[in-house]
Image (cartoon, rainbow, N blue to C red):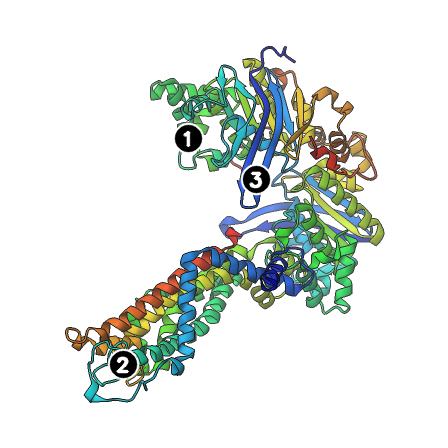
Amino acid sequence: MHKISDPILTVENMSVEFPTLSGVVTAVRNVSFTVGREKVGIIGESGSGKSTTGRAVMRLQPPQAIVKANRMQFEDVDLLTATEDQMLSVRGRRIAMILQDPKYSLNPVMTVGEQISETVILHEKVSRKEARARTISMLERVKIRDPQRVFDLYPHEVSGGMGQRIMISMMLIASPSLIIADEPTSALDVTVRQQVLSILDELVVERNIGLIFVSHDLNLVRSFCDRVIIMYAGRIVETIAAADLDNAQHPYTRGLLNALPSLDHPRDRLEVLRRDPKWLEN
Amino acid sequence: MTQNSSFTSLHNWLINEEFTSTRQARLHKMYVAWLSLLANPLAFTGFLVVLSLIVVAILAPAITSYDPYSQDLSRALQPLSWQHWFGTDEFGRDVYTRLVYGARTTLYISILVTIIVAPIGFLIGATAGYLGGWVDIVLMRITDIFLSFPSLVLALAFSASLGPGIENAVIAIALTVWPPIARLARAETLTFRNADFVVAAELQGAGMIRILVRHIVPLCAPSVVVRLTLNMSSIILTAAGLGFLGLGAQPPMPEWGAMAASGRQYLLDAWWLTTIPGVAILTVSLAFNLLGDGLRDILDPRNA
Amino acid sequence: MSMITVEHLAVSYGSGDTLSRVVQDVSFEVARGEAFGLVGESGCGKSTVLGALAGRNKQWTGSIVIDGETIGQKRSKSQLAKQQMVFQDPFGSIHPRHTIGRTLLEPLEIHGKDRRQERVEKALSDVGLPQNFRYRFPHQLSGGQRQRVAIARALILEPSILLLDEPTSALDVSIQAEILNLLKDLRERETLTYILVSHDLAVVAHLCDRVAVMQDGGFVEIADKRQLTEDKVTHPYTRTLVDGSRGYVHHNLRADADHALSSLEQPPVRLTS
């Protein structure tokens, strides 16, 4: 655990609305949180607004979405008033994002090595040879055996876990101070998940940066992250340290915890979550 | 006011998704499709034109005052006038009347071709897609053979060998129209062949016919319907082409293509003989195209 | 009394050059009323075993005996009715253009059953859905409701065995709990035999009495529920899965991560079926 010094990201009272044919849909409502040099998990079920929150921080929501907030500050950049040009220099460079399926994030017609080299050249403006050397070392850094061979592979020839590690390596070339990971290991097997997360963990610790981990997997988030934010119907219902999760106060959090089947606490029946409409009032 | 509110309450009942009967569920689907059609102005225009064509064809005797067949050489080649809205042809027959009766011929050919082509094309394509293996190979190679001929050439060849006449023209045109339908049906069948709901039905003992008819047809139907509608224009044009060349509808039967053909020799003096049927062919083809495009938007499951 | 006896089952896909044996050689027995789990990672062959039992995969060798009857590659309607499958994807397992009532009536029509309306009504109430859902289309239902329909469809032919292929993997945690409870209740009420396939060990251990752990087409261990909950499993691979079900394990980041990777690294090119 690290000392949480100045927050890298501060979000105050953010809302994201989508105009639809039947009226305005509020995907995220009055959400406030900070992220320091720590791993923060955002947990929620489908429709909770967790992915929308992650994307709104990067200003990656669809053009018709309306984002409102009192404050959205990333280090020295005011995310609310930044121009698209300014955001272009922030995205990928200072805030990096990892998505669920590397297949959709990697260009299928370029080899893995070419893509990473492109990123290097884009960010550091070095020669091709130099970029290749950097790429090989980044691949080694994410514990890929035989990086020379992997350099020449195409994305479809690479397994899921390796694809994610490649995404991580691409992302870290630019030395971001904040990583937003949206279900990065949901498509991976249990053993591979452990590898990928340990690389992510190591890199976050080593570089002393912040990580937002968006997921529906409560067990994973509570074991991986330092703090957990629980979202329901677009709102934050609870923010708590991962270690304290068993003492969670909000009935939704408790309901989620009790609804999970667990090897360590076998039960005859799982507690069914009873949604209280009071949770929707704010 | 009561009229208005009874419409609104009917609308609300149809829009409501809380169904209480299978009939309501079906009517709801149809009503929603109708509303989408209304929302698409081009498609709706196409639909209105096609509807007018059908109405005109049905009401032909009621909306014309001349006999399409009676000749009066003293009144030949008269230009547009109040007595003859579209003038007269070389035999003194009223062009407007022949145009309206010609609509019947056009509709007859188009509908007949569609009725023949849809089930045959679908059956061949869906069977090939469902069974796969050598059945697929054989059926698709046959389809390819038909597909590789330009349609007008093929229609001409069949028409010429079968002899002139409208029924033979229908058969000839049908033989050129079925291959794309078969390919489409096969492609759609392949998409759904291994879907869980098909596998579930198979695991419950459903045979091939049941699966094709009950499961695959409802999913293929939208693309096939759209394809057929878009094909209408080429059916009409092919029929017109055959008529133009003396095959297909035989004189004195009014048919737009034949009318345009026989008017060619008088083009400079009596432009209306070729132009008017030509414009009719153009309008109806365009209308079917617009309608087909609109149907694609409505029926495409990806848009649902 | 054994409901299902499988001996030396091997299942393959493709032929000639593309022949791949996904299930190598598995043997197991499931007693009447027992819930048997198959757990493993992607590509291990667990869904394929289920498919062979269901009659979905026909390219298998070995012997399958269901309720005393030896099963061949081709099955009769009454043989098919003995075991029914519940699929993983609630969005794909029901025909999108059929109403729920139509979906439930179809198996009854195929098997020529009587009192059809009554059976449909019973099926809906057994899975806790209101009667007016019969007239709805699948897109009007939530994932959890669709999965209930899938279970209702599986039960309507009154099978003795339910084959469940990751039935809750696509559902939210809270909905998963409801479906798992429903499955448990149904099993007790109707004395059903279950075979449950999942990658989630916690789900499998919750519902099943015994669990077979699969890797690369074979069983590495068959553990019972107590072994799993009391952490008394024998095979190291099972232990990895048990640890993994608890979430992320913090290691001494340098040394242990290297060690973990070297013992578990998958070959880079992997074709999953």
Q: In 3D space, how far apart are the residues under numbered discs 2 and 3 (Cα atoms)?
A: 60 Å
Q: Is C184 drawn above or below residue B127 in the view shown? A: above
Which percent across, then down, holds residue C96? 59, 56
In which chain is the residue bearing label 2? B
Q: Secondary structure at mark 2?
A: loop
Nearest to the observer: residue B117 or residue B85: B85
**Horizontal and vertical percent for residue A240?**
70, 21
Direction from residue C70 to residue B255 in the image, left or right:
left
User: Which residue is identified by label 2?
Assistant: B83
- Residue B165 quadrant: bottom left
C230 on left or right of B21: right
Q: Write down the chain letter for disc 3.
A: A
Say few, some or many: other residues with alpha carbon within 10 Å of mark 2 (under 14 / 14 to 19 / 20 or more): few
Residue B267: which quarter of the image? bottom left
Amino acid type at circle 1 is: Asp
Relative to residue C61, is residue A41 depicted above or below?
above
Report the residue marked by disc 3: A24
Q: Which mark is residue A181?
A: none
Mark closer to the chain start, 1 or 3? 3
| Residue type indicated by callout 2 | Gln
Q: Which residue is mark 1?
A: A152
Q: Quadrant of the C terminus of chain A?
A: top right
Is residue C124 rendered to the left or right of residue B123?
A: right
SS at mark 3 in the image = strand
In this orientation, which residue lies closer to the viewer: B80 or B4?
B4
Q: Position of residue C115 (x, y in %)?
A: 77, 68
Q: Quadrant of the N terminus of chain A?
A: top right
Q: Nearer the viewer, residue A276 or A176?
A: A276
